[in-house]
Structures are given as structure tokens and as C-alpha cells.
Amino acid sequence: MGSRWGLIAALAVVVVLGSTGCTRLDGDALAEQEAWSIAERIGDDLAPSVMRARTAEWLVASHVQDENVELPDGSSHRVEALSWSGATSDAAGAQLLLRISVDIAAHSPDTVGDIARAAGSATLCAQYTVVGDRYGDAPDLEQVDCPDGDVPPLPSPSPPPTLDPSSAAILEAVLLSTDAAGLEADVMAAFPQDYVAIETTVGDGRLIAAVGVPSEGDCIVGVRESDGSVRAGGGFPPERLMPGEIGCSTRLVTAPPL
């Protein structure tokens, strides 16, 4: 990601005052540079190493609400979400429009080698298009003209579905009480949510069940060994649970990838 702002700021950030020979940092140029740096950082945050399908309102609520910062030197920056629509799983992606405002406080040097800084400010609007839910997908970032109008309240989306923290204990209890004939039905009864995927396998005296939320890479696998001992848990490498990979499957135990 990049912008003409980076070049402009790099050229203009230092102003030499010919009459005095002093060097003073240009506050407006510093503010422009900082505003674009914030826009790029938010873009990086929108594309974690393992992405999941997300709505635009979830992205806004997760990445904008804590972006109002007052700095000790009197400088500040503010990030406001002006609009959002769609989802990362849509063909057009999730669309986010953010307004980023930066105020740089003036600074007078008080030690040898310190550099003066003029006060300055800058505001820019950043349009993000976030498409995809796979590793390596990255949002497109473009600077656009800021629209007029009031700032809407931040959304309050429902959290993504996940397995309950007690799921491993529940699965262990099911494995202790079931048998080969009733394994699948008993696991499904214990995890009736429509967003939960279940896979069961019986063989070599073992009962194995995988329970997960595919859209979130959330997965536990439980095993009852032929001697009656039971264990269940997760912690599988995220890349194995991604779309196109082995996923949340009993094969994580019976035929784990090398």
C-alpha cells in the first residue's frame, strides 16, 4: 500500500529557515505522514495472518473503536468510521471508509540537538476493500475525498460463533458414556448448534469425534482408546484448519499431515 502523501511528507517534513540557519519540522507535513501511517497500520490489522470471513461492521467495531488517542506532548489523532458495507466473503468484499485526523503540537527545543517543530494538522479519508478469507489476502487501500455529513455511531455486531470453553469436557463425557453405534448421534445431541460441524470415526477399538466451527478455525478432537481412556482437546496448527486443508476432521488424529 502507498500514496502520494508519503512522498510529499518526506520532501516537506523538514523546513530550513534560511534567515537563522535553524531547522524546524513542518507540522502539517508531519501530520500528513502520520495520518497515512495510521491508515496503513489499520490496513495491516485488517488482514491478520489467518483471516476469517467477516462483515464490514465487525471489522469497524474491532479496529476503529479504540483509535482515538491523545499523546503526552499534546498531539492527537482520531479515526472515525464514516461508512461500512458488505462482507469479506462477498465478491466485492467488505467496504470501509475511515476519516483519519491528526493534530501535531508545536515543540520548542530545550536540549542540545533537539529540533523545533511547528504545530500542524491533517485529515484524510481512507477507503478499504477487504476481500477473501485466506492466508495472504490483503485489503486494498486508497485515499479518497472526504464526504460531508455526520459520523454515524459505531456498530455493535454479534460476535462470531465459537465453541464453548467447556466443549472439550463435554466431548469427553460423551465419549465415556457412548458406544460405537451411538457415537455420532450422541455427539450431535451434545453439540446441536447449526454452525458446529461434526465428524466421527470408529476403528481399531477407538471412538473418535471432531467438533468444530469451520468458519472460525475452532476445533477439538476427542478420542476414547480401546482401554477406555479418554482425551479431548484442540491446539491444532491454524493452517491445517483453513479452507482447502484437512480442516476439523478425525484425520487430525488418524492421519495427521506431516
Image (tube, grey):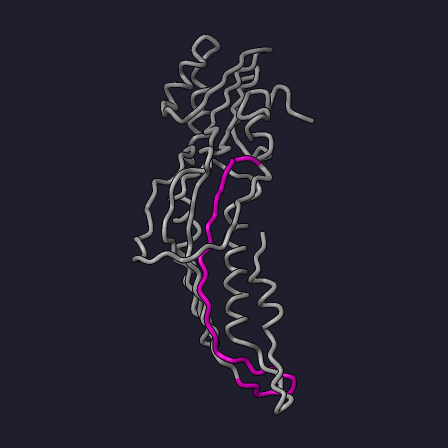
Q: Choose top left, top right, bottom left or bottom right for residue 250.
A: top right
Residue 122 lies in the magenta-colored region: yes
Residue at image coords 50%, 16%: 200
Residue 192 as seen in the image, left or right of residue 114: left
Q: Where 153 sits versus 56, above or below?
A: below
The image shows residue 31, relative to residue 193, as above or below, that is: below
Q: Examine the structure image and report whether residue 227 is included in the region drawn in magenta.
A: no
Q: Residue furthest right?
A: 258
Taking the spot 51% from the left edge, 36% from the top edge, the residue there is 132
- At which x and y percent is residue 156? 32, 46
Q: Position of residue 115 (x, y in %)?
A: 60, 82
Taking the image as shown, residue 93 lies to the left or right of residue 255, namely left
Looking at the rendered image, the quarter that the C terminus falls into is top right
Kindly identify the residue that appears in the image at 45 percent across and 61 percent down: 124
Residue drawn at x 50%, y 23% is: 210
- Residue closest to the far top: 181
Where residue 139 sits: x, y (%)? 53, 45
Q: Which of these two is toward me, 156 or 253?
A: 156
Q: Is residue 219 above or below residue 152?
A: above
The residue sitting at the bottom extreme is 20
Q: Is residue 187 left or right of residue 23?
A: left
Where residue 42 appears, as percent x and y from the top left, is 50, 53
Q: Count up the numbered dots.
A: 0
* Closer to us: 69 or 28: 28
Q: Nearer the viewer, residue 231 or 135?
A: 135
Task: Tell me where the magenta segment starts and ends, as one range.
Answer: 108-134
